[in-house]
Amino acid sequence: MKLPLSLIKSFIQVDLPPEKIGEILTLLGIEVDAIENGHPSFAKVVIGEVLSVKKHPDAKNLQIAEVSDGKATYTVVCGAPNCRAGMKTAFAKVGAVLTDADGKQRRIEPTTIRGVESSGMLCSGSELRLSDNHDGILDLPYDMKTGEDAVHLLWDPVFEISLTPNLGHCMSALGIARELSASLKIPYKRPAAEKYSVSPFTVTVQDHALCPRYMCLLIEDVLVGPSPYWLKTQLEACGQKSINNIVDATNYIMMKLGHPMHAFDADKIEGSIHVGPAKSAFAFLGLDGVEREAPPGALLISDSKKPIALAGVMGGANSAVSDGTQRILLEAACFNPISVRVTSRKAGIRTESSQRFEKRVDPVGVEVALSEAAKLIGGKIVGFTDVKKEPFHPRSISYRPQRINQILGTKLSETEIEEIFERLGIQAENGKAAIPTYRGDLNEEIDLVEEVARVYGYNNIEKDIPYCSTSVIPNDPIFLFEREIRTRLTQAGLTEFLTCDLISPALGEISKEIAPFAQLKTIYSKSEEFSVLRTSLLPGLLQVVKGNFAQKNQTIAAFEIGRIHFLQETKVNEIPMAAILLTGHREPQNWSRKPSEVDFFDLKGIIENLVAADFQPSRNMSMHPNRQCDIHIDDLIIGTFGEVHPRLLEKFGIDKRIYYAEINLINLLKKKRTHLKMAPLPQFPASERDLTLPLPLKLPIEEIFEAIHAQKSTLLEKAELIDLYHPEGLEVKNATFRFVYRDPLKTISSEEADGEHAKIVKLLSIKASMPEHNK
């Protein structure tokens, strides 16, 4: 919402800089996003009167104007097409300073244009940064005093304000003035309504719950035409477009008083007015020229034959005010917020009017708005109607001063609290607050507590050091363990993914192939897409992978810690799991080397860094048959990992290899080591030997390591595989091992290392030549 300072000052006289006013409003909970023209963008610019105009002798598009500042006459060369004798405009005299949008200043100097000396400049709205109009110079009202400083008459800062949904009472200059009055203890002008004694205009309201109050005036002898300068500039500052004096008057009152209004061409209304809901959907042509479908139940303003407006949203083109209009029906009403919101949403239109009705309008303020608009429009009032079920009275809310002080941490007396309420227009006495009709946001005692805090000032509330107490109940061990696993996987360079425990039935069917458990389904679900509890983390993660691939993110190293759910006989199980997923490149793109793809052993390495476990072949149907393992600690299986089966990936439209691990955190916690054994650093050097063995293709490397460890050498410290090569076309593989020998009590000699190494070489040679591995 945009509001010019001059419109606010029409209610309250505030002699503060715009920045200070913005700060006060923000502290009151009314956020000021920006202040346009916070400082004048021009200096030494006055109101000038054009005395005469003649053509430039040497330029087709230029004119020579004689301009008066009330004291002297100046010759000014001007290129504006609307420059004419008798008009008043902004005159930048020699020495005046203009500031552009980038903050650059330009000083007006005497100059010669095509042989004619020009002593100053006649300014457009854009040159003074008052508007975007640069097609001609400003055409100011003739009643402006010649020679008056233009800053006093034209400069008007504009506040751009953001309001939360509960601040509907602040959606006007009057609302902002009330807030400033409460904060600064300055009285504001309260507009009063006129009383009309003319004959009533027939209006029928079908449901007073949908329309608590409907008022209208029938005005004759109106003149439709352009709005005066002051009205146009006020509306433009509010972000509104000027249409004609009738429509502009209603929009101006809306921005000034916060009450939406509408003017109908009375000669286009057939019969009396009826307010009631639509029985069925129908095509509605609005004032904006767009035809929309009005939903059934939408609150309508209708005459005897047709709908003429969507109540609180938009008027119809069939009753619009035009240049030939001579009689208008001026409407000001109070409509049900929910009804307006539903109609606005279903019809697909949101207007300044609907936004205010959705946040509630003041039913008492209706007659004030109607009266003010009628004064602006003029004409002869010949009909008046005020339809309401009952009078509107202030609501009463009980409050406790001690409770207010307890919540806020203040020590305000009951008199001080009542004084704050008084400044807000709330009559308070003996713990009872009478809430004005324009404050629809105040419904409970806690709302009054917030009002006291706002007006008293959050900055004035003492900030005591809070007392801190911790729970004596210890954290759940699995919670602490999940946090530890999350930290370690993050340190491994993995990104955490979060997917929902609820999946679609389609993913549920896929889950049966991965984890064949009895699934749990929700009784009531918001959507079928979230109606089945997952039995594995894999389907959800594959959905995420699919989405990343669609966005050209082909490399993923991620983990998730979440829960799976399944039914075991009659018992519902909820198991915390950790999942790891790898796909794409092993390292970032680099010019010096070609990137390599992650593989089974990258995933195995991450698991080995996470847990000290053994790996045994598994038969998981969701994994590639030759690239999967179970993870064992002692006799307990804690998880499984491997390459996801291509058949499963095909169901997600994924054509790249995916490596996946899923670990049961309950089982892993059971095997968590509580004490770490440390070994001293070796004091003596080691001796290394490498051995390359041709091995049968079907001989697992694990069996070689089992044979080495079975030797139980006292000098062998470590054995590792450092290279594996499979010659093309041969049924053998060449495996290179590195052996590290060390004597913990002395420096090992070369002869000792050779002797121990020879025993192992002999053992492995026999193992490699055993006939069962050559079949």
Image (tube, rainbow, N blue to C red):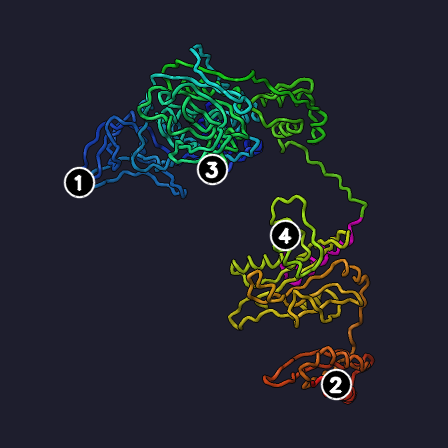
Q: CA distance from mark 3 to mark 4?
A: 32 Å
Q: CA distance from mark 1 to mark 4?
A: 80 Å
Residue wearing tag 2:
767
Which residue is located at x 52 percent, y 17 percent?
388
Q: Which mark is residue 503?
A: 4
Mark 3 vs 2: CB contact within 8 A: no
Q: CA distance from mark 3 to mark 1?
A: 57 Å
Residue 679: x percent and y percent?
A: 80, 71
Mark 1 vs 2: CB contact within 8 A: no
Q: Secondary structure at mark 4?
A: strand
Name the residue type under label 1: Asp
Q: CA distance from mark 1 to mark 2?
A: 110 Å
Name the residue type under label 3: Gly
Alpha-carbon neighbours of circle 2 within 10 Å: few (<14), some, or many (≥20)? some
Q: Which residues are magenta?
A: 474-498
Residue 494: x percent and y percent?
A: 63, 61
Using the image as rendered, state which of residue 76 and residue 540 is in the foreground.
Answer: 540
Does residue 493 show up magenta in the picture?
Answer: yes
Using the image as rendered, state which of residue 659 and residue 42 is in the foreground.
Answer: 659
Q: Secondary structure at mark 2?
A: helix
Residue wearing tag 1:
58
